[in-house]
Every structure is written in structure tokens, then in C-alpha cells.
Image (cartoon, rainbow, N blue to C red):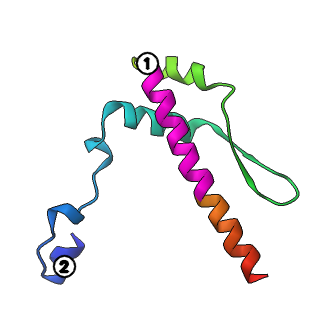
Amino acid sequence: MMMEQLGEEPKPEEIPPRFEDLLVEAQEAWQIYQSLQDIWEGMSGTFMGKNKAGMFDLFRVYEVENVREVMSLVSTIENEYMRYYMEQQKQKSKKH
């Protein structure tokens, strides 16, 4: 829509996928990851990951069929978030 407003033709390779375009397992992994409680370290405010205590209950609630694949994707999502937050912490410490 933005490209249309600018009067330009969007390049297909630059259009990000919609959530609905992702594999079912990726959609389920994202929903489960977002449903898990964040864990933050109290003193520094550092993101420590997600509390996975209720993850298998969420697999049942979302009726996940391919549990192994979705678990792997949840781990991948968490690893990317952890990398992002660690980079943010480095940037903050460089400024101070």
C-alpha cells in the first residue's frame, strides 16, 4: 500500500510474507512463544527468556500435531530474541 501511495511498483522479493503465508508450524510456534511468560532479571532488567513451564499445555490448547517441529521453532524464535536483546544491552552499555 505504501508503494502504491508513492506511485511505485513493489518488487515481489521485497514484500515481507504475511503471517498467513507462513507454514502452520511456524504460526503455531509464534503463537505459543507469544503466550509464554517473559522472564526478566530484576536488578538489571535483562531479558532472560521465556518461562516454558506451561508450553506442553499450550500444545494441547492449540492442538499442535507436529510437536517436535514446533518446539524446535519456538527455540529458534527464542534464540533470535535473545540475540536481539543481548545486542540491545551492548548498545546501551556503550552509550554509558
Label 1 residue SS: loop
Tell me if 64 is positioned left or right of 7 in this view.
right
Compared to residue 31, the image places residue 64 above or below, namely: above
Residue 36 screen position, x and y as percent: 62, 36
Q: Of 58 and 75, which appears nearest the observer?
A: 75
The amino acid sitting under disc 2 is Gln
Give the foreground label among 2 and 1: 1
Examine the image and state in which quarter residue 44 appears.
bottom right
Label 2 residue SS: helix
Residue of label 2 = 5
| Image: magenta residue range | 68-83
Examine the image and state in which quarter residue 12 appears.
bottom left
What residue is shown at x 29% (from left), y 50% (from top)? 18
Compared to residue 69, the image places residue 79 above or below, namely: below
Compared to residue 34, the image places residue 90 above or below, namely: below
The amino acid sitting under disc 1 is Glu
Residue 1 screen position, x and y as percent: 21, 69
What residue is shown at x 60% (from left), y 56% (from top)? 83
Q: Of 75 and 52, which appears nearest the observer?
A: 75
What residue is shown at x 40% (from left), y 20% (from top)? 66
Tell me if 9 is positioned left or right of 79 in this view.
left
Q: Which residue sits furthest right?
A: 43
Q: Which mark is residue 93?
A: none
Q: Of 78 and 10, which appears nearest the observer?
A: 78
